[in-house]
Image (spheres, rainbow, N blue to C red):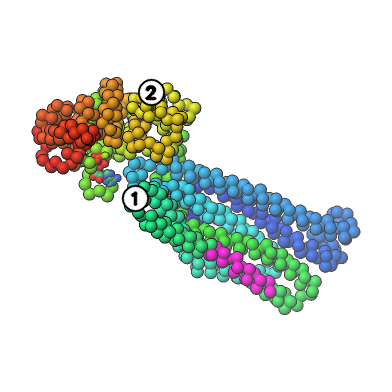
Amino acid sequence: MIKHFRIFLAYFGLGYGRAMILIVLGSVVVAIFEAMGVLLIFPLMALVVNPAEAISSGMIGRLYDFVGSPPIKVFTALFSVIVGAVYLGRALFQIGFTRWQYRLIARWKIAICYRFFCKFLDADYGYHVQRNSTRIISLITTTVELVLNNFMYHIISLTAQIITATLLCLSMIIFHPLVTVVVGIFFFVLFQFQNTYIKKRIRDVGGHVAQFKAENAFAIQQALGAYKETKVNLKEKYFRTMFMSANKRLMDAEGRLLFFQSIPVTTTEIIVLSVVIIAFNMITVAGETSQAVMQSLAVIVVTMFRLIPTVNRSLTSITFINSAIYPLDMLVKEADAVGFRAGATDAVDEAEPPAMVLEQALSLRGVGYTYPGAAQPALRDINLTIRRGEFVGIIGPSGAGKTTLIAVLLGFLRAETGDYDVDGKRIDDQRIRSLRHSIGYVDQQPFIFDATVMENVAFGVEKADIDRNRVEQALHQAQLWDVVSGLESGIDSFVGENGKCFSGGQRQRLAIARALYKQPSLLILDEATSALDVDTEQRLSETIRHLKGSLTIIVIAHRLSTLQACDRLIMMKDARIVDDGAYEELLQRNETFRHLVYASQVRGTDDRDRRETPIDAVLGCDDSPEGQ
Ligand code: ADP
Ligand code: MG
């Protein structure tokens, strides 16, 4: 347990670890109150049972003299008020102290979640490609909560309980060493039993709860995320079963955990009751007078009365702590994966590097990249220079490495071999941020917020700071204005979860408007027009043609109309660049290209299908050597 606590502090202390000292001090204060309350019962009992003897000597005697020897009854009343005040003081302090602890834990949770969130945002593309997003969500929302509530809170609670129990036992030792020893042995055995017999089971079941929670969330997301596919394929039963089994396992595990958590309360009650009976017998067997027996019993009963909840809480805390070991391990593993401990300041608080604009050219030299676990490289020896103002089209069959190449240009993937530089400057982590200021990018599957058109176009800008005119202009450029202006609330209309209320082509144009709103100097479109009809695509090509020259454009596209507008085409195949030249040049020297243009033209004249043939449909099935 101590080992885990050290690990916890090392990873997730975040400056809050020091508060543990205050917690220990506060717990000592509570324990002193507690012990004083118990110790004061003895003289109070003495005053009630045999007042004359009680005031004749010791502390009571001195106090009696100090307050000017009032009548015994008045003194007894006064003394009971003092005892009451001690209990009241304890209660008030406890309330304040508890409130402070909860607030501390709340702030601690905020700090950990925030740091995790920042680290997830900072984590490189490779990390996100391999992680399932529900797992990340459940880590931030559930696992941090589990660890803080079940591990951290109970470590604090256990510390407080142990200090209190120790002081209570110490005060009892003064009166009844033998009884204390017997009680001590009982509790020791109880703790040992808890530690050895059920510890492992609790750890296992705690692990199951954390794991099944994540699986449960995953099952729900899978089923509801694929709503249409589920219905069309009549697979409701499959997902019902998947959800049922995940949920059943979770609920069963939670039930077992609750059962384990309830065990200590019952066992301690039995043990404490036995201890009181044994103590009673020990005192009478020792042959003490009835007055002394009364007093001793009063002290023991009061001590036990305080000790029972203390021991109960300690045992419960141990259960909770054990149940949180697995989630803690999960958190630690994830923390290692995202570099949670590295870098004290969170990226958000760092000053942004100044914007960097492509002035002359960007170039890749000998760039290679292989995805983790992949058998073949996704990029091999890529040599490519793109000058400012060029309009470059990238073509090639699917799986050729086009998207991967873009991911390298955007700095999502770091080239494993070779160099990437812009205007002669090597692109490192700092420079890529500078460059991103001036990059407009449209993903193959653009993400659309569940927000208004305006907020989607001005991505991540505070509502008050959005330039509405610029939004409208971007929508015009993206050929989406006709659609948006026809909506009831115009640019203030909501687009639904992931743009549900828009068609595929409209979503793409929304994403293009987003890229243009940024007024980029480098525009990168990854199959951003694949879902558009020919007319819209041609109008968009027109817009892009107008932009040509003022900014650098890289498009991955399959449509001839877009490709004809390009200054230069780069053909990729099997992770390599296999040709690079103007449309006309490729037409002359590249057999594959000629073939595909021919095929597109033939099919393009078919009036029943106004969509042109995507180029990779032709490229993909053509295995002839590239013409020179
Ligand atoms: P394109 O965009 O040309 O269709 P990609 O660049 O997306 O192709 O993919 C190139 C190759 O890399 C493909 O063979 C693909 O299977 C592989 N690939 C893409 N993403 C990953 C990934 N996250 N992990 C492993 N392999 C990947
Ligand atoms: Mg792709």
Q: CA distance from mark 2 to mark 1?
A: 40 Å
Tell me: 266 left or right of 532.
right
Of all residues, the one furthest to the right in this rendering is: 71
Kindly identify which residue carries mark 2: 473
Position above or below: 575 against 199:
above
Which of the image's four quarters has the C terminus? top left
Q: Which residues are magenta?
A: 259-277
Q: Is residue 265 magenta?
A: yes
Q: How many marks?
A: 2
Q: Which one is in front in this view, the residue at disc 2 or the one at disc 1?
A: 1
- Towards the viewer: 363 or 227: 227
* Residue 321 locus on image (x, y percent): 52, 58
Please tell me which residue is depicted at 29% across the width and 36% down the height of the picture.
Answer: 531
Callout 2: CB less than 8 Å from ligand 2: no
Q: Quadrant of residue 215?
A: bottom left
Image quadrant of ligand 2 equals top left
